[in-house]
Amino acid sequence: MRKFLVVLDDSRECLNAMRFAAMRAAHTGGGVAILSIIPPDEFNHWIGVGNVMREEARERIHAHFEVFAKWMRDKQGIDPELVIREGQPMDEIMAHVLADSEIGVLVLGAGTDKKGPGPLVTQLSRSAGNLPIPVTIVPGDLSKEKLEAIT
């Protein structure tokens, strides 16, 4: 089964990437893998404090994931899988794509503010020629109706 890989983060544009991936998966008989990355610099504290912070980050990720997973199951009939990795975002995305041969497309949401499309979109567009899979960049301001029409 081909899976759409979506990166779960705290950005607003993440929502449209999730919607797009779920709708495409539902229409093509695919699946959705949701990747959340915990940057290593979040835990540069004493070991005990760092472990507590790591666990709290995982709890936040699970709570955030459950919101998207419920919508995907209820509205699209897709049961997504959650993958949590620790490290630098680009390194972890590439490592996961290489580790899971069912990943067929990476879906990212592009920011709409004046700062640009976001750090992941910017970094991935620079190295797109080295990626083993296509990348779909979903504009963050697309309406639900427009997303439904194009998926």
Image (tube, rainbow, N blue to C red):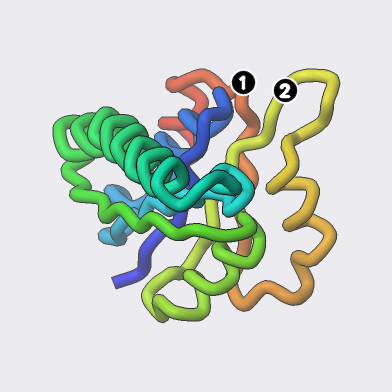
How far separated are the C-alphas under marks 2 and 1?
Answer: 7 Å
Q: Position of residue 91 (x, y in %)?
A: 63, 66
- The quadrant of the rendering that contains the C terminus is top left
Q: Secondary structure at mark 1?
A: loop
In the image, 16 versus 150, the foreground residue is: 16
Place residue 42 in its image quadrant: top right
Q: Is residue 78 left or right of residue 147?
A: left
Place residue 110 in its image quadrant: top right
Q: Position of residue 136 (x, y in %)?
A: 60, 51
In the image, 141 versus 151, the foreground residue is: 141
Residues at discs 2 and 1 in contact (Cβ within 8 Å): yes
Identify the disc placed on residue 64: none
Q: Position of residue 124 (x, y in %)?
A: 73, 57
In the image, 75 versus 9, the foreground residue is: 9
**Circle 1 crowding by C-alpha within 10 Å: few under 14, some 14–19, many from 20:** some
**Circle 2 crowding by C-alpha within 10 Å: few under 14, some 14–19, many from 20:** some
Residue, disc 1: 141
Sequence-wise first label, 2 or 1: 2
As shown in the figure, which amino acid type bears the numbered disc 2? Answer: Thr
Q: Position of residue 64 (x, y in %)?
A: 33, 31
Place residue 113 in its image quadrant: top right
User: Who's the residue at 52% across and 19% down the image?
Assistant: 143
User: Who's the residue at 26% across and 60% down the image?
Assistant: 29
As shown in the figure, which amino acid type bears the numbered disc 1? Answer: Asp
Q: Secondary structure at mark 2?
A: loop
Residue, disc 2: 112
User: Who's the residue at 63% across and 58% down the image?
Assistant: 88
